[in-house]
Image (cartoon, rainbow, N blue to C red):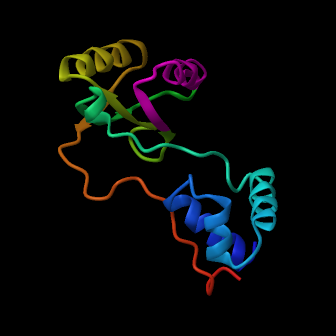
Amino acid sequence: MDKIDRKIINSLQKNARASLKDLSKECFISSPAIAARINKLEKAGIINGYHSSIDMEKIGFHVRAFIQVQLEPRQKKEFYPYVQSIPNVVECNCVTGDYSEIMEVVFPSTTDLDDFINTIQQRFGKTSTQIVFSTSVQHRGITLDNETLD
C-alpha cells in the first residue's frame, strides 16, 4: 500500500459512496486508476465491504446494550451459530477476561432485551449487561497516516 491507497481508504471510510471522479480529484490520478486500485484493495481483503450508518432509534430500536457471556469452550460450537442467527446481535467478539464473549445488541424495548438475556442465560449461562445511555464516539474507521505507514 502506498500513499494513494491510504488516501483512498481514508476517503472511503468517511464516505463509502464517494464517486470515482471525486476520489480521482482528491488523489490526482485518473478515475480508471482509482477503480483499479479499489479493485486491488478489495481483492487483497483490505476493503471487505461497504456499509450504511443507520440511526437505530429512528427505525424503532431504542435500546442498545453490551452483553457479556461466560462460555465454556465446548459451548462455542452452539453459541456462534445461534448468535449469528439473531438479527438484533449487531456484533459479537471473543474476548479475554471473566467473560469470553461480548455482544452489542439492539432491541425495540427493555422487555425485548430482557427476553433475549433470559434465553442466553438459560442456554449458555452467566451474563453481564450494560445498557447504553449515550455514545460519545460513533463507530468510525481509523485514519491511515502516510508518514508512519510507509
Per the image, is 34 magenta? no
Give me the residue at 56% from left, 53% from top. Answer: 16
Which quadrant: the N terminus? bottom right
Location of the C terminus (image quadrant): bottom right
For this orientation, the residue located farthest to the bottom is 147
As rendered, which of 35 and 124 lies closer to the eye?
35
Q: Is residue 76 magenta?
A: yes
Residue 59 rendering spot, x and y as whole percentages: 30, 29
On screen, 149 above or below 38?
below
Query: To which quarter of the image does residue 24 belong?
Result: bottom right
Q: Position of residue 75 (x, y in %)?
A: 54, 21
Residue 117, by quadrant, is top left
The structure residue drawn at horizontal position 42% and vertical position 13%, both measured from the top left corner, is 123
The part of the chain drawn in magenta is 74-92
Q: Is 95 rendered above or below residue 24?
A: above
Residue drawn 46% across and 20% down? 86
Number of numbered discs on residues: 0
Query: Does any portion of residue 64 appear in the rendered image?
Result: no
129 horizontally vs 34: left or right: left
Camera-nearest residue between 27 and 76: 27
Residue 128 position within the rendered picture, expressed as x and y whole percent measured from the top left: 28, 33
Is 99 placed above or below 29 here?
above
Residue at horizontal 37%, vertical 18%?
Answer: 120
Q: Residue 77: x and y, percent?
A: 61, 21
